């Protein structure tokens, strides 16, 4: 893999490092919303609908804040990678092929972890199933938020800046994927960290190669939407 981003000045390098640390900190703090100590502090036992929606609104605010930081403090564009416009047909082909890759690779890791006895039920995931049961609008909201916000932050913002800082796309993809997987620790199981890590690797390689953030966002949205929809239909 070759470095395809523009050289970074010392001042912008420092600003980018602060930007990455800042967004990781706020994402970590926001992930505490669903933890037991936080819930108990507000007299709750589980995440309710209001708290779930509030957390999604926060994510949109974070990406807007990060956009402001990139344009006003770093004084550069949010997305460092220039995107070549795809035709509608090519866009559809990219989405379909990337989804095929995801559905070929991710279940393999899930099955391997299951055979090793490393797959356990997630209480947080089960709570999410309860909240989304029969609420298709909520499934769409969760999926769009995850697809757009997480991809804009991790693949769009963090990965290219890490590539400039480390001068290695391999390191940038690996570190970004590790951070992306670690963000899902709140679900409480290893597979809910490993799965996103592998997804991050696949999406990170694609984004490095093709610079198509819209394709990555669409695939992330579809992955979450399909997963939540199937769970909604199967769980009574």
Image (tube, grey):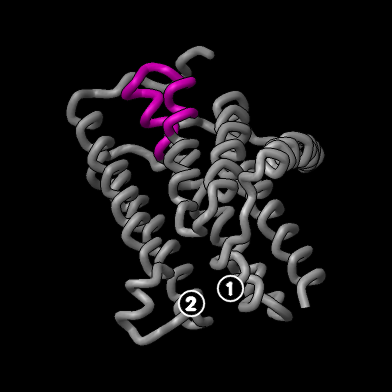
* Residue shown at 71% from the left, 36% from the top: 112
- Residue farthest to the bottom? 43
Which numbered disc, 2 or 1, marks the residue that appears first in the sequence? 2
* Residue shown at 50% from the left, 12% from the top: 2
- Residue 166 coordinates in the image, percent (x, y): 34, 20
SS for callout 1: helix
Q: Against 197, is 130 above or below?
A: below
* Front position in the image: 35 or 168: 35
Circle 2 is placed at which residue position? Answer: 47
Residue 27 is left or right of residue 114, and the answer is left
Residue 217 is left or right of residue 101, and the answer is left
Q: How many residues crowd mark 1 within 10 Å: few (<14), some (14–19), many (20+)? A: few
Q: What label sits on residue 76 in the rendered view?
A: none
* Residue shown at 43% from the left, 69% from the top: 34
Q: Against 186, is 104 above or below?
A: above
Quadrant location of the C terminus in the rendered image: bottom right
Q: How many residues crowd mark 2 within 10 Å: few (<14), some (14–19), many (20+)? A: some
Magenta stretch encompasses residue 48: no
- Residue 62 coordinates in the image, percent (x, y): 37, 59
Circle 1 is placed at which residue position? Answer: 127
* Front position in the image: 120 or 193: 120
The reply to whether residue 196 is in sight is yes
* Front position in the image: 35 or 95: 35
* Disc 2 to disc 1: CB gap under 8 Å: yes
Q: Against 179, is 142 above or below?
A: below
- Residue farthest to the front? 117
- Residue 78 coordinates in the image, percent (x, y): 40, 42
* Residue shown at 50% from the left, 75% from the top: 53
> In terms of secondary structure, what is the magenta stretch mainly?
helix
Magenta stretch encompasses residue 173: yes
The magenta stretch is 158-175
Q: Against 155, is 42 above or below?
A: below
């Amino acid at each position: 893999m070759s470095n395809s981003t523009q050289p970074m000045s010392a001042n912008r390098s420092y600003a980018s490092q602060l930007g990455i640390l800042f967004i990781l900190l706020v994402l970590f703090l926001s992930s505490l919303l669903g933890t037991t100590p936080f819930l108990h502090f507000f007299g709750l036992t589980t995440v309710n609908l209001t708290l779930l929606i509030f957390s999604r609104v926060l994510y949109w605010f974070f990406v807007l804040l990060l956009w402001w930081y990139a344009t006003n403090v770093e004084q550069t564009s949010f997305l460092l990678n220039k995107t070549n416009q795809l035709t509608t047909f090519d866009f559809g082909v990219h989405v379909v092929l990337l989804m095929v890759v995801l559905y070929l690779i991710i279940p393999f890791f899930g099955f391997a972890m299951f055979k090793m006895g490393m797959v356990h039920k997630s209480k947080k995931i089960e709570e999410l199933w309860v909240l989304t049961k029969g609420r298709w609008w909520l499934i769409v909201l969760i999926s769009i938020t995850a697809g757009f916000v997480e991809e804009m932050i991790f693949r769009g913002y963090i990965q290219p800046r890490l590539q400039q800082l480390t001068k290695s796309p391999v390191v940038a993809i690996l570190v970004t994927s590790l951070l992306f997987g670690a963000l899902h620790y709140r679900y409480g199981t290893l597979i809910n960290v490993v799965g996103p890590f592998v997804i991050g690797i696949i999406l990170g390689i694609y984004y490095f190669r093709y610079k198509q953030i819209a394709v990555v966002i669409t695939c992330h949205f579809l992955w979450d939407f399909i997963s939540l929809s199937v769970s909604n239909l199967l769980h009574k």
